[in-house]
Structure formats: structure tokens, C-alpha cells
Amino acid sequence: MAVFLSINGFELTADETQVVLTIEKLASGELKLNEFTTWVIKNITRSRDLERE
């Protein structure tokens, strides 16, 4: 996911532990896709490299 975001000019702001826990919840079905989408939107920012352009 981090590679996909990076290619598209974004980076995760959540720490690694939170990312792993969230992905585990998604994989187990505890977290629904729409909830995961909301989580991603809240935990990304524009890449610093693109902010300079």
C-alpha cells in the first residue's frame, strides 16, 4: 500500500504499528472496506517531494 501511495504522490502518516493493526482488522473482516477507505483518507498526506513543485 505504501508503494502505491508513493507512486501516486502520497505517504502514510500513521505509525507502522497502527498500519499493521488496521491491515490485520481488514484481513480478518473486523474492518469493512468503507471503514478502511475512511482510515486511509485520514492517514495520508501529500508527499513532501510533490509539495515543492
Image (cartoon, helix red, strand yellow):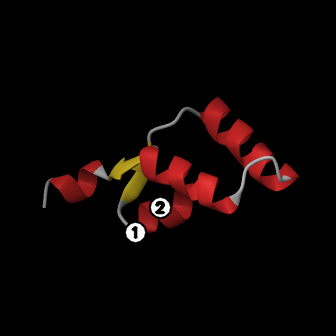
Query: For this rendering, which residue is in front, 9 or 34?
Result: 34
Is 23 positioned to the left or the right of 44 in the image?
Answer: right
Residue at (62%, 53%) from the top-left corner?
Answer: 36
Compared with residue 45, is residue 13 higher up or lower down, i.e. above or below?
A: above
User: Residue extending furthest right?
Assistant: 28
Give percent across and percent down for residue 43. Answer: 46, 44
| Residues at marks 1 and 2, CA–CA distance in whole angstroms | 5 Å
Task: Tell me if residue 51 can be seen.
Answer: yes
What's the amino acid at mark 1? Answer: Asn
- Residue 18 vs 9, above or below: the answer is above
Which residue corresponds to the image point at 32% horizontal and 53% vertical from the top-left?
Answer: 47
Q: Position of residue 38 (x, y in %)?
A: 52, 53
Which residue is painted at 72% across and 48% down in the image?
23
Q: Residue at x 55, y 32 (%)?
A: 15
**How many neighbours does mark 2 have within 10 angstroms: few (below 14), some (14-19), or many (20 or more)?**
some
Any mark on residue 8, and which?
1
| Residue 17 tag number | none
Kindly state the secondary structure of the residue where label 1 is placed.
loop
Which quadrant of the rendered structure holds the C terminus?
bottom left
Do the numbered discs 1 and 2 sit on residues whose CB atoms are within 8 Å?
A: yes
Q: Could you tell me which secondary element the residue under label 2 belongs to? A: helix
Q: What residue type is labelled 2?
A: Leu
